[in-house]
């Protein structure tokens, strides 16, 4: 099942080598795709922006009528233990909370909590330097504000993304763009305003950080963005925990701006990297 | 994990007692809620309408870019072996095909196939005799024609169903009713026409059988039905593999028709029970 080096995984109170991390098939994720999750970065032994991710995790769980079986403080201790056990250089931690082992395959019970940690796979330097090509697709997630495990459409679209030689797919609804399956979206307008969609999106932690950084140097707005406005933008980029800022230079075959990563995108990426360093060295941000 | 008697489960080529039926947490159902499934009834050792269910299972898999790791003939042999092993009086068999163990938690790999069998829980006699109360909710499934495992909205709504003292929730979109999370919907109009939604639904096997039975005695139509038309119907009922035909007497607090299960609904239920008996005794239908 696993050929890569084995890391420890936490499942319902126990730490175990990854190959042993299993759930019974009656779990409501298997039966009905029901669960929420969270994913954050860890630099050596330090999680980045952990409080933000934990807050969103508890909010997602609560919205889906699931109860995290630990207080935030307990969960932090579990995470600390796991991170120490695995002792990785640069990693990602994923916490999944499912609907639990359901007797009738439909009604949620006591949730199952799984925490995995793996080395981080960052975007290649080439992608950052050249920018990426994306496609668009009309779709609105069932619970846009909640980080559920339902990625049926996002994964189904992987086929189409490959067919079109693209890297990602940007959702829109009624001509208003929203988000990627796993990333947020930004544009830089002709007058150097940094804009990101306000509604019907998962509020990314990286998105929040980028907005804070952008507002120090530029006009920064959260509002609706039409597909038409996107095509006329000077720069476009995506944000995510893993990808930080990734410039987008082509959308549905149309070249955006100069066709190269723009100066605002690259500047904000550097600011974000500096912010992360700043946080890691313990300085107040 | 299980307190009930243990049945055998099939997981990726092996038959095992239910408590041993596990999937690794890297499975794409756990990670991303990605998978399809099928559920059919078994009377002693005989599956009912198996070919219809198998056809839909392979179609669902194909639509979601998943490949069933067996031919239909092989799968029939697996099912026969499982059904013989468990030797239950009246049961339901569920086949789940997931996106497989994903290295990166996003891209599908070789699917995992899980087949569970459990005693059938039929609706109580009281529910059939008195009819049930339902609520409505505006929602369209992501892949309406496909039996995916994504029931996020359906399960999330269980809370609201209980709050309103109802049994089920009927989806509609733009004032057109479609289906329940796990059942199809029918109305009987004032002129005794039996009507079921045509579009944006999972094409139920019981729905198909009921339409065939209805068309022998009544005018039977597949077409759009508005919420308004539903409220003015003489009778309404749902169909599903487990529930067969279940009369609906109240929708969003409004009484339908006489407020009691209607003669057409009950007649069709008897016709369906007779059809099942007919099939089981080996007569050509």
Image (cartoon, coloured by chain):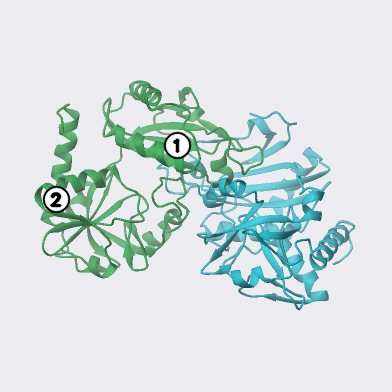
Chain colours: A cyan, B green
Q: Is residue B276 above or below residue A235?
A: above
| A168 horizontally vs A175: left or right | right
**B128 or B105: which is nearer to us?**
B105
Q: Position of residue B96 (x, y in %)?
A: 45, 37
Dot 1 falls on a residue whose secondary structure is strand
Q: Position of residue A166 (x, y in %)?
A: 65, 51
**Residue bearing the label numbered 1:** B96
Q: Is residue B152 above or below residue A219?
A: above
Q: Position of residue A198 (x, y in %)?
A: 62, 71
**A231 or A66: which is nearer to us?**
A231
| B187 horizontally vs B6: left or right | left
Q: Is residue A87 above or below residue A37?
A: above
Dot 2 falls on a residue whose secondary structure is helix
Q: Chain of mark 2?
A: B
* In the rendered image, residues at marks 2 and 1 fall on the same chain: yes
Q: Quadrant of residue A212?
A: bottom right
10 Å neighbourhood of mark 1: few (<14), some, or many (≥20)?
Answer: many
Q: Chain of mark 1?
A: B
Q: Position of residue B198 (x, y in %)?
A: 29, 55
| B244 horizontally vs B35: left or right | left
The residue sitting at 37% across, 53% down in the picture is: B181
The residue sitting at 64% across, 73% down in the picture is: A229
The quadrant the C terminus of chain A occupies is bottom right
10 Å neighbourhood of mark 2: few (<14), some, or many (≥20)?
Answer: some
**Residue bearing the label numbered 2:** B266
Instruction: Give the mark nearest the N terminus, 2 or 1.
Output: 1
Q: Nearer the viewer, mark 2 or mark 1?
A: 1
Mark 2–mark 1 Cα distance, whole angstroms, equals: 33 Å
The residue sitting at 11% across, 59% down in the picture is: B192
Residue B195 seen in the figure = yes
Give me the disc on residue B183.
Answer: none
The quadrant the N terminus of chain A occupies is top right
């Amino acid at each position: 099942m696993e050929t890569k080096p084995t890391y420890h995984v936490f499942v319902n109170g126990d730490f175990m080598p990854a190959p042993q991390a299993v759930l019974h098939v009656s779990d409501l994720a298997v039966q009905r795709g029901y669960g929420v999750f969270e994913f954050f970065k860890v630099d050596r032994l330090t999680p980045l922006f952990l409080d933000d991710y934990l807050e969103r995790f508890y909010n997602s769980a609560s919205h889906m009528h699931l109860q995290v079986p630990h207080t935030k403080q307990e969960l932090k201790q579990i995470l600390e233990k796991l991170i120490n056990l695995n002792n990785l250089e640069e990693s990602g931690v994923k916490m999944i909370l499912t609907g639990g082992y359901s007797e009738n395959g439909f009604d949620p019970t006591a949730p199952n909590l799984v925490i995995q940690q793996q080395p981080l796979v960052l975007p290649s330097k080439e992608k950052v330097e050249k920018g990426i090509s994306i496609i668009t697709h009309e779709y609105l997630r069932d619970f846009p504000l909640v980080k559920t495990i339902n990625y049926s459409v996002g994964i189904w679209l992987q086929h189409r993304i490959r067919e079109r030689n693209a890297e990602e797919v940007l959702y829109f609804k009624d001509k208003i763009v929203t988000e990627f399956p796993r990333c947020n979206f930004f544009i830089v307008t002709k007058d150097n305003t940094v804009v990101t969609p306000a509604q019907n999106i998962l509020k990314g932690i990286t998105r929040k950080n980028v907005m804070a950084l952008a507002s120090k140097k530029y006009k920064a707005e959260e509002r609706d963005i039409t597909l038409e406005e996107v095509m006329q933008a000077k720069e476009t980029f995506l944000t995510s925990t893993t990808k930080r800022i990734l410039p987008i230079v082509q959308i549905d075959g149309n070249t955006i701006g100069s066709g190269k990563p723009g100066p605002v995108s690259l500047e904000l990426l550097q600011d974000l990297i500096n912010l992360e360093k700043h946080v890691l060295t313990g300085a107040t941000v």
